[in-house]
Image (cartoon, rainbow, N blue to C red):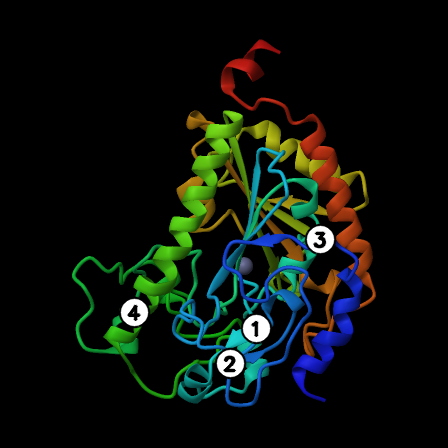
Amino acid sequence: MRPCDVAHRRAGATADAPAPVSHYGGQGGGGAPHCADADWPICWGSPATMMLPSPDPADVLGFVPPFAVDEPAQHSLPFVFNTGHSGAIYPPAFLAASRLQPLALRRSEDAYVDRLFGCVVPMGAPLLRANFPRAYLDVNREPYELDPRMFSGRLPPFANTRSMRVAGGLGTVPRVVADGQEIYGGRLDVEEAVERIERLYKPYHRALRALIQRTARTFGQCILIDCHSMPSSSLGREADPKADIVLGDRFGTACAPLLTERVEAAFRSRGFVVVRNKPYAGGFITEHYGEPNLARHALQIEINRGLYMNEASLAVTPGFGALAEALQDIVAEVAGDIGDLSPQRIAAE
Ligand SMILES: [Zn+2]
């Protein structure tokens, strides 16, 4: 069975969801899914990531389009949702440069997180989602966290080559996939990394920043929810019971504490085991965009993949539907009573 056949069959789970508007056209949102031909970017996963081969000018480095903003008919909630790690399009040139099989590359994805949070669009919040895969480019990093050992040629002098994430192989252009296997058989030209950053990373962050600014202008505040999923193994053997959800607010610095409290309570009341900031305190996006003193709040949500997918085969499991429903209820509950998160108002209460 071709990967897209699997995705088509799974597409029925969200087939009756209202079709969101996509800024970037293509086949985004709830439109009929199409499979790519063998000589075109191979696609997997959600219907939203399946594109027709086309000479569309939106083709950037083999991605048509590289990312999309699913816009609600009316932006009625002060929220922006982002999923930068659920992209599932693998251009042939990337597959050819990698020494890994596609399934091994795919294990770095936060698979289907765009679908799990797709409910927020009809509820009134925009969803920004990457189509390029995390193994190709990681938008939850600084723009130039790069490992000089990966590249032939000299990195720009401003590159951050010494971060813990670079040391671990998980820089802006990752060296390894989630289980530590090297992605590439040889060195990449440094121009290749710069091109991914200029043509994918920077436009992605421009889109995210624009959504945050628009939301803050409209509502007087913006609540960014950065959506991820984590391997169940990342929680360690001693974690008992294992966390279902890890909320990362950079130890209370990326959003008003009330937001973390409300989200945590909403998950707990539905039986989820919730942990804060360990082992994930929030990545670059949470840290960079979370400015609670400027009424810009950011919270990272990591979902245990064991709740909704088979982590070896990447097939969704029957838990997917219940989890998606719970997320919808949780967003509705939190959005319904979050109110104004400004320090003045919270202090007055
Ligand atoms: Zn992630």
Q: Which mark is first along the chain, 2 or 3? A: 2
Residues 21 and 49: in front is 21
Question: Where is mark 4, residue-wise?
Answer: 195
Residue beneath the point at 43% across and 63% down:
138
Q: CA distance from mark 1 to mark 2?
A: 9 Å
In the visual, does 320 lie left or right of 79? right
Q: Which mark is first along the chain, 2 or 1? A: 2
Residue 238, quarter of the rendered image? bottom right
Question: Where is mark 1, residue-wise?
Answer: 51
Amino acid, disc 2: Pro
Quarter of the picture holding the N terminus? bottom right
**How many numbered discs sit on the rendered protein?**
4
Amino acid, disc 1: Met
Does the image show residue 188? yes
Q: CA distance from mark 4 to mark 2?
A: 18 Å
Tag nearer the camera, 1 or 3: 1
Question: Where is mark 3, residue-wise?
Answer: 244
**Ligand 1 within 8 A of label 2's CB?**
no
Tag nearer the camera, 4 or 3: 4
Residues at circles 1 and 2 in contact by the CB criterion of under 8 Å: yes
Instruction: Classify mark 3: helix, strand or loop.
Output: loop
Q: CA distance from mark 1 to mark 3?
A: 32 Å
Instruction: Classify mark 2: helix, strand or loop.
Output: loop
Percent x, y for residue 307? 75, 60
Amino acid, disc 3: Asp
Q: Which mark is first along the chain, 1 or 4? A: 1
Instruction: Classify mark 1: helix, strand or loop.
Output: loop
Residues at circles 3 and 2 in contact by the CB criterion of under 8 Å: no
In the visual, does 195 lie left or right of 170? left
Q: Which mark is first along the chain, 2 or 4? A: 2
